[in-house]
Image (cartoon, helix red, strand yellow):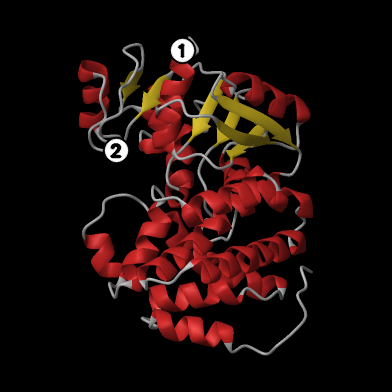
Amino acid sequence: MLGAGRWGTALANLLVRKQCDVLLWAYEPEVAESINREHRNPLYAPGASLDPSLRATSDAAAAVSGRDVIVSVSPSQLVRRVLSPLAGVVDSAALVVGASKGIEIDTLKTMSQVSEEVLPGRPYVVLSGPSFAEEVEQRQPTAVVAASGNPAAAARAQQLFSAPAFRVYTSGDVVGTELAGSLKNVIAIAAGMLDGLGLGNNPRAALITRGLAEMTRLGVALGADRSTFAGLAGVGDLVLTTCGSLSRNRSLGVALGRGQSLAEYRAGHRAVIEGVDTARAAVRMAARAEVEMPIAAKVAECLFEAKPVRQAIAELMERTLKPELWT
């Protein structure tokens, strides 16, 4: 398990409870030491009760050596940096499961594309869906998707992660699953902005609906299956992150709506907010694919050009009138 953030820790704990032999890699040696000695991860998962059988290391090569499944849970902008040095260590037949939600900003590649470049030939599965780590830790009923172009790999990941409170469905749409899981974070930032301004249910409903339309439009243009965006990785994860109080992307949006800048918010928060880089990536991808993503564009302007949130909302509402189209 590569990445001892909140989500990586929750997934590692889930697998250990299933009697899997898991070795969790943490970038910080003190995190690995705390997990091994105290069965706690106070830096990234404070309050989580970790299974005493969970082991951790700060040596990435040791974490993947001889393992038949590698789960990549690093922040998306670091996935290439983490995986590249391990190409000679990861078994050529190892299953790689990607659980990071983001788009590489420099290349506009998804995590499956990054993995194929640095760990070529290994079967790849993306694990995504509405799944707050804190609620997985509490064993609250959760459903996600394991998507792969290799049906056997998807079925293997399904069996590996499925647990009484963690239901896994399979899908063959890697592109759609990855894009849905990434783009919903941008809409979640926008939803937080509405809450930060003290707005109500009408704006949120409009945002979620039109945000889903944007996500679907870009996904279809890039080869995704439209139905993926109506499933767990799409509307399911979108509802969770736009409405859930545990969403880090939504929390950033709340702060922006209340007048904070991105720099001010980052100064007081350690956790990575994936929607920030994804907003910038989405705008570039939309331009390249020649599709409209007005909400994503306004979020990017608020994040990087200090556009006032109320002005961004007014500009969205005053756009040229048109039919409701999902194409």
Which of the two residues, 207 or 68, is positioned nearer the viewer here? 207
Residue corresponding to mark 2: 44
198 to the left or right of 115: left
- Would you say residue 151 is visible in this rendering? yes
Q: Amino acid at mark 2?
A: Tyr
Q: Secondary structure at mark 1?
A: loop
Relative to residue 55, is residue 140 depicted above or below?
below
The residue sitting at 71% across, 36% down in the picture is: 148
In the rendered image, the vertical position of residue 324 relative to residue 311, given as above or below: above
Determine contact: label 1, label 2, CB under 8 Å: no
Q: Within 10 angstroms of label 1, few (less than 14), some, or many (20 or more) residues?
A: few
Callout in the foreground (1, 2): 2
Q: Residues within 10 Å of mark 2 (few under 14, many from 20)?
A: some
Quadrant for the N terminus in the image: top left
Residue 21: image tag? 1
- Between 54 and 243, the one nearer to me in the picture: 243
* Label whose residue precedes the other's in the sequence (1 or 2): 1
Tell me which residue sits at (50%, 43%) in the image.
Answer: 100
Q: Indicate the position of residue 200 as horizontal and vertical percent values.
A: 46, 69
Give the residue drawn at x 69%, y 31%.
Answer: 169
Q: Position of residue 208 (x, y in %)?
A: 59, 63
